[in-house]
Image (cartoon, grey):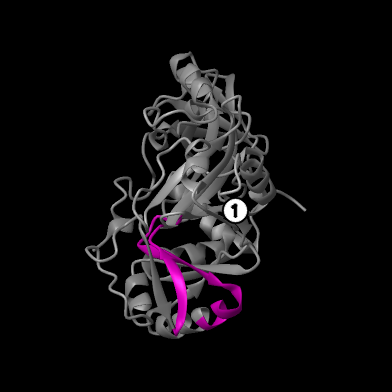
Amino acid sequence: YSFTRNVVHDVVGHEVKAVREGVGLMDISAFTKVEVIGPGAEALLDQLVANRLPQRVGGIALTHFLNRRGRIEIEATVVRLDDNRFYIVCAVFFEQRLVDHLNHHIASEDVTVNVLSESWAALALQGPKSRQVLGATTDAALDNSAFRWLSAQSIDIAGVPVWALRISYAGELGWELHGPAEQMLSVYDALWRAGEPHGITDYGSFAMNVMRMEKMFKGAGELTNEVTLPEADVMRFVRLDKGDFLGKSQTEESAASTLPWICTYLRIEADGVVDGHGGEAVLQEGRVVGSTASVAYGHTVGCILAFAYLKPHAAKPGTALEVIIAGSTRQACVLGEAAYDPLNLLPRAK
């Protein structure tokens, strides 16, 4: 055993290339899937999340649930499926935390929390050819005017009704497709048949992690209950003017204070042998200024990418740093934008 690259490295590289240049299909059924319904659903969620809830049916919001100390409990995608029906998706290992958090704050009987993690399954169809593939399996209009970025619609694929979410953790044109688990194999088969002329490829969680790192998308390794929203540098998903929510005053205090650390995006030189795994020391002129949280080799951009919690003076874009990976000192630099598609144009592609 060692920390060096193994055969998986090239497999992941193949999957990343397939998604970036064509189309890929991933089973994301393991994600936590929870439904909150009832006349009080909106009021409940509004007091628990830091972002505004989607106002229109089909609207999607990325948001964070906080604890009373203002630390991050869960990052989640919230979809409004109907006036009094919300669908929440988050990481698989946060299911019990999310359900407990919701149930703990229910103040009346007009809200019901249903766990759909087993009864519903989900697929991610991602890549520049995803619209062509999905379009061959459904009568729904998929152009930008009919199906905008960050929206959801109920569509039929191979006769199966699913919720299609136009979002992408890979940073490409794509959709997530959520529906009854017993029927999703038919959806998978239909997508695969439609995708074969386009070279469709299955991809997995390692490739997904690489692509989210290339896109500067944070994950569970960075968004923990040890940090505030300003420290995690996710304030663009926060609306302090929306009214009170759990952890709001603590978030305001954190934003107004001198931060002890801040989540920072790094480019690190690669040696082709060891890429790092998180927890590596980050130095500036020989002094430790923080440590990495997540590390991955970016196959598309040809370098190692990392998120690290650093002292603020070392977190400015362009700052030269060193990272100790398996005893070897690597040169690193703070990036101020995503290494791949920094303007985020690809998910909105026409």
Please provide percent x and percent y for residue 310: 53, 25
- Is residue 9 left or right of 239 when viewed as pictured? right
* Residue 107 within the magenta-colored segment of the rendering: no
Amino acid type of the residue that numbered disc 1 sits on in the rendered structure:
Thr
- In front: 139, or 136? 139
Placement of 68 over or under 304, stated as above or below: above
Q: Residue at x 37, y 59 (%)?
A: 172
**Image location of residue 245, percent across then percent down:** 50, 31
Q: Of all residues shown, which one is farthest toward the right?
A: 1
189 left or right of 51 in image:
right
As drawn, which residue projects farthest toward the front? 109
Residue 139 or 273: which is nearer the viewer? 139
Residue 159 lies within the magenta run:
yes
| Secondary structure found at label 1 | strand
> Residue 33 is drawn in which quadrant?
bottom right
Quarter in which the C terminus is drawn: bottom left
Q: For mark 1, what is the residue?
A: 112
Position of residue 1 relative to residue 13, above or below, is above
Horizontally, is 80 left or right of 283 in the view?
left
For the question of whether residue 261 can be seen, the reply is yes
The magenta segment is 158-186
Residue 168 shows in the view: no
Q: Dot 1 surroundings within 10 Å: few (below 14), some, or many (20 or more)? A: some
